[in-house]
Image (spheres, rainbow, N blue to C red):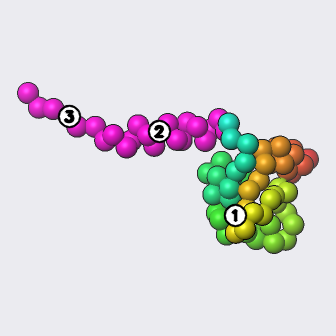
Amino acid sequence: MRRIRTNPHRKKEEKEIANLKKPTKEFFTSRDLVRLGVFSSDDEAYEARKRGRSPDYYKIGRRVLYSKDQIEAFLSRSKE
């Protein structure tokens, strides 16, 4: 009888993808916003910040963090 091996990392990846669809975090990075579809790339997120066309954000050292509330407000403004 032949055993079928499964990739143990695949389940972890599937869980991470499911969690991205239901964000429960309070703060998000630019990469998180790319994964959620707010921006198409990290470069686009950077350009949007530079031009003032992104959600309000916090800069802590070199990290850029977006709050969940600001992302929701930005998305509702952009739909109008």
Over which residues does the magenta segment extend?
Answer: 1-23
**Residue 58 pos. (x, y %):** 80, 59
Q: Nearer the viewer, mark 1 or mark 2?
A: 1
Name the N-terminal-most of marks 1 and 2. 2
**Residue 14 pos. (x, y %):** 47, 38
Tell me the element at label 1: strand
Q: For residue 52, which quarter of the picture?
A: bottom right
Is residue 13 shown left or right of residue 31?
left
Q: Looking at numbered disc 3 in the image, what kind of residue is underneath it?
A: Ile
Q: Nearer the viewer, residue 61 or 30?
A: 61
- Please tell me which residue is depicted at 85% across the width and 57% down the height of the picture: 56
Quadrant assignment for the N terminus:
top left
Q: Is residue 12 visible?
A: yes
Magenta stretch containing residue 9, yes or no?
A: yes
**Residue carrying label 3:** 4
Is residue 8 shown left or right of residue 48?
left
How far apart, in angstroms, are the residues tagged by discs 1 and 2? 27 Å
Give the numbered dot on residue 63: 1
